Image: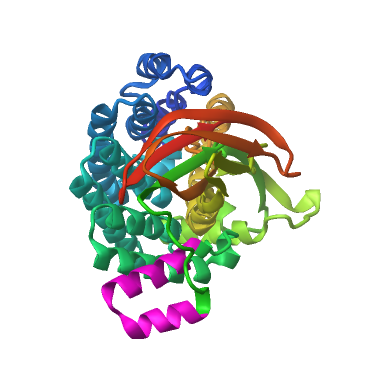
């Protein structure tokens, strides 16, 4: 009799059935309408404590857009601490997740999500006029990237180019020319190395910044080398400052659930009564099933059709993909500096083999539980099989309010107060929207930072 083994299995299945991520529909609606206070109220009502880390991600970003910079930083700090703690403890949760749903595993955030905490915290400190604290976030982001690289020799430095570029700008703002030069060199290397992977053209301003700073620092050899590649930087406007406008567009794709069916064959040793079913054997059998994906088998060969659910992404490109900024003193076009959709998908692709194996092994364990239950009686077997079906759900938790892409506008303007006209274009380069930023203050030999978000 196997009743003692079956009951804990049923209890865990019931626990799994009760887990689901919170809904973001009302939060996102208020967010898109620019009613950030309402978005926070909806988020707190729906999600507080239910999915802790995703909740912290969403709350930190919404507070950032609502100009609640201190609150945003406090929330992101807690998100950072929580993520680091969960990341180190995640291995201990594997045994539970093999039996039940991945939704019972502690969500530690993806690599790019953890990295973007530091981007938004840095900008919070910029708006609070705390340059030293903004630079701390740059250094923490750099350390996190190095951690990823040390942990995985195949890591493709998702987000490295953008973080390095932004760090160079912030180091310049703080007057740390040497670290700015180093950051721009990292940005040059990363953008060029991963241009084909991430699809982000090399921003020419990175090269001009290297020429300009090499000259300023007296690095003659580097100056000559960079000038030969990137040319002479454009002449600055007298008594001017610089506008740094980061434009974020659209939404990162949410994770969705995809169902896959794997055939368990009558000839498979694992279905035999005397089969070895220890952990090693089940894992190896899981790899065998994965290799059967998309293969055709005759119905007479099939013992059972194992359905599993895995997370997946579908492209969610925004309709607005370009920005131009104009003043009475000229204008500048935004350049793509970060593609979060691609970063999300590349990160997921690297994680998918592990997710797939874990999911299939869990499915096999559920199937074996069904076989044991069926031996106890047809009714209990049907119940277990039903629970197997209804509790099979993919882990679709993610940071849903992130933008899809980030563009950068850099332009020098005379010191003073300006009105800046923003023009937004679609994929056919047609102007589809305009807006005016009024009373933008530019200070001599300083940088003015702004960010702007559209959702179309």
In the rendered image, the residue lying farthest to the front is: 238
Please provide percent x and percent y for residue 354. 47, 56
On screen, residue 52 above or below 211: above
Residue 48 coordinates in the image, percent (x, y): 33, 21
- The answer to which quarter of the image holds residue 218 is bottom left
Residue at 57% of width from left, 35% of height from top? 422
Q: Can residue 145 be seen from the camera position used here?
A: yes
Q: How is the image coloured?
A: rainbow
Q: Nearer the viewer, residue 308 or 352?
A: 352
Image quarter for residue 238? bottom left
Instruction: Please identify the quarter of the rendering in which residue 180 is found.
Output: bottom left
- Residue 134 pos. (x, y %): 25, 47
Q: Is residue 29 above or below residue 13?
A: above
Q: Is residue 339 left or right of residue 185?
A: right
Residue range highlighted in magenta: 205-228
Does residue 95 appear anywhere in the picture? no
Horizontal placement of 319 versus 179: left or right? right
Where's residue 358, x and y in %?
A: 47, 51
Q: Give the quadrant of the N terminus.
A: top left
Q: Residue at x 30, y 80 (%)?
A: 219
Q: Residue furthest bottom?
A: 221
In front of the other: 110 or 265: 110
Q: Residue at x 35, y 41 (%)?
A: 120
**Could you tell whether 54 is left or right of 247 in the image?**
left
Q: Of helix, strand and loop, which mostly describes the magenta segment?
A: helix
Q: Is residue 232 magenta?
A: no
In the depicted structure, whether residue 19 falls above or below residue 156? above
Magenta-colored stretch includes residue 224 = yes
On-image quarter of the C terminus: top right
Q: Which of 420/166 is in front?
A: 420
């Amino acid at each position: 009799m196997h009743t003692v083994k079956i009951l804990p299995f049923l209890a865990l299945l019931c626990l799994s059935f009760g887990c689901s991520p919170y809904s973001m529909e009302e939060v996102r609606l208020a967010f898109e309408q620019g009613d950030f206070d309402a978005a926070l109220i909806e988020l707190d009502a729906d999600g507080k404590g239910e999915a802790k880390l995703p909740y912290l991600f969403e709350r930190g970003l919404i507070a950032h857009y609502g100009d609640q910079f201190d609150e945003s930083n406090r929330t992101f700090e807690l998100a950072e601490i929580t993520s680091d703690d969960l990341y180190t403890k995640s291995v201990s949760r594997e045994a539970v997740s093999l039996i039940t749903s991945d939704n019972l595993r502690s969500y530690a955030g993806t690599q790019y999500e953890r990295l973007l905490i530091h981007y938004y915290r840095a900008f919070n400190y910029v708006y609070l006029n705390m340059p030293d604290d903004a630079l701390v976030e740059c250094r923490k982001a750099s350390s996190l990237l190095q951690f990823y690289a040390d942990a995985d020799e195949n890591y493709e430095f998702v987000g490295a180019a953008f973080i390095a570029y932004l760090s160079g700008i912030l180091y310049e703002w703080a007057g740390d020319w040497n670290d700015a030069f180093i950051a721009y060199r990292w940005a040059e290397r990363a953008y060029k190395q991963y241009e084909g992977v991430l699809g982000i053209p090399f921003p020419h301003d990175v090269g001009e910044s290297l020429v300009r700073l090499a000259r300023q620092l007296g690095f003659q050899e580097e100056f000559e080398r960079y000038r030969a590649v990137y040319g002479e930087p454009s002449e600055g406007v007298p008594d001017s400052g610089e506008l740094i406008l980061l434009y974020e567009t659209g939404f990162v794709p949410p994770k969705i659930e995809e169902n896959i069916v794997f055939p368990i064959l009558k000839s498979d040793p694992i279905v035999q009564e005397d089969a070895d079913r220890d952990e090693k054997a089940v894992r190896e059998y899981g790899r065998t099933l994965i290799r059967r994906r998309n293969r055709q088998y005759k119905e007479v060969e099939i013992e059972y059709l194992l359905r599993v659910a895995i997370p997946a992404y579908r492209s969610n490109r925004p309709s607005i993909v370009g920005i131009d900024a104009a003043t009475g003193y000229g204008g500048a076009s935004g350049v793509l500096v970060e593609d979060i959709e691609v970063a999300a998908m590349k990160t997921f692709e690297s994680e998918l083999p592990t997710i797939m194996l874990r999911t299939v092994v869990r499915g096999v364990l559920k199937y074996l539980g069904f076989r044991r239950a069926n031996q106890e009686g047809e009714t209990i077997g049907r119940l277990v099989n039903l629970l197997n079906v209804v509790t099979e759900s993919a882990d679709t938790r993610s940071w849903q309010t992130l933008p899809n892409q980030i563009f950068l506008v850099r332009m020098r303007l005379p010191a003073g107060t300006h009105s800046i006209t923003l023009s937004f274009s679609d994929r056919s380069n047609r102007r589809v929207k305009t807006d005016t930023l009024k009373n933008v203050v530019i200070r001599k030999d300083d940088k003015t930072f702004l960010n702007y978000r559209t959702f179309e």
